[in-house]
Image (spheres, rainbow, N blue to C red):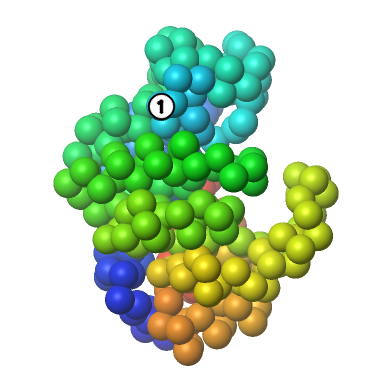
Amino acid sequence: MSPPTAPNAPDWLTARPIAHRGLHDRAGGVPENTLAAAEAAIRGGYAIECDVQLSADGEAMVFHDETLGRLTAAGEAVGARSAADLGALTVAGSAERIPTLPVFLARIGGRTPLVIEVKSRYTGDLRLAERVAALATAYDGPVALKSFDPQIVTALRTLAPGLPRGIVAETRQDDPAYATLPPSLRRALPGLLHFDETRPDFLSWRVDDLPCAPTVLCRLLGQRPVMTWTVRNPDQRRHAAIHADQMVFEGFCP
């Protein structure tokens, strides 16, 4: 199937395989969401997906986890430290440090498409979305924004109306984090019941949950492309090729 198009979903959004958190290789000294991982993706000809968290002083930091323990020698929440303190931490025993989003954008410099996932605790706090939207709007390069949180995606309609925005979702809510969400939100997420508010330009769906009604309907009727995550093996890659328009991958080079 040819990738469908939507008014705010440009062709570049699905033109290249998307390296999950950059083309990282922790054993090789290239941790996820670092400048080295971004450079590796660019050398390979891939687009980049990254995650952002909010520092204590309001900066967008390129880091996936809410807490620092998995990848650094620190143990507290990312939001408990300033951008300067976070930038001084080395990542996964490498020489790489946690970059701010401004530094990350400057390093990529429009050389490849970038998809930024805005992390959320579903509290209604829009400070991170506001900071990311301001930076992405001023960025001279192909960039798209996405989030699991419908409230953030809805806010991005106003904060960055000219940029592609997507909703990240999965059908099976087997992550323990879902247990803390209100039942109404848990129902809304896999069924896209928030569609009228979010009006996403694309979907980003877990590969093992494909196909499902929301992705099929959005591709065929809504003319919205589907990227799928996280593709790690040949079976998932074949599945992604049938049911999605592009993949977010890691652990191999397509």
Q: Is residue 229 above or below residue 175?
A: below
Q: Is residue 206 above or below residue 132?
A: below
| Residue located 51% across and 80% down the image | 218
The image position of residue 86, as x and y in percent, is: 47, 16
The image position of residue 98, as x and y in percent, is: 43, 22
Q: Is residue 15 above or below residue 108?
A: below
* Amino acid type, mark 1: Glu
Q: Nearer the viewer, residue 28 or 102?
A: 102
| Residue located 60% across and 69% down the image | 194
Q: Which residue is tagged 1?
A: 59
In the picture, the quarter occupied by the C terminus is: bottom left
The image position of residue 120, as x and y in percent, is: 58, 43
Q: Nearer the viewer, residue 231 or 120?
A: 120
The 10 Å Cα crowd at callout 1, few under 14, some 14 to 19, many 20 or more, is many
Q: Which type of secondary structure does the marked residue at label 1 adopt?
A: loop
Q: Nearer the viewer, residue 126 or 65?
A: 126
Q: Which residue, as the protein is rendered here, is positioned at the far bottom? A: 221
Residue 94 visible to the viewer: no
Q: Is residue 111 above or below residue 60?
A: below
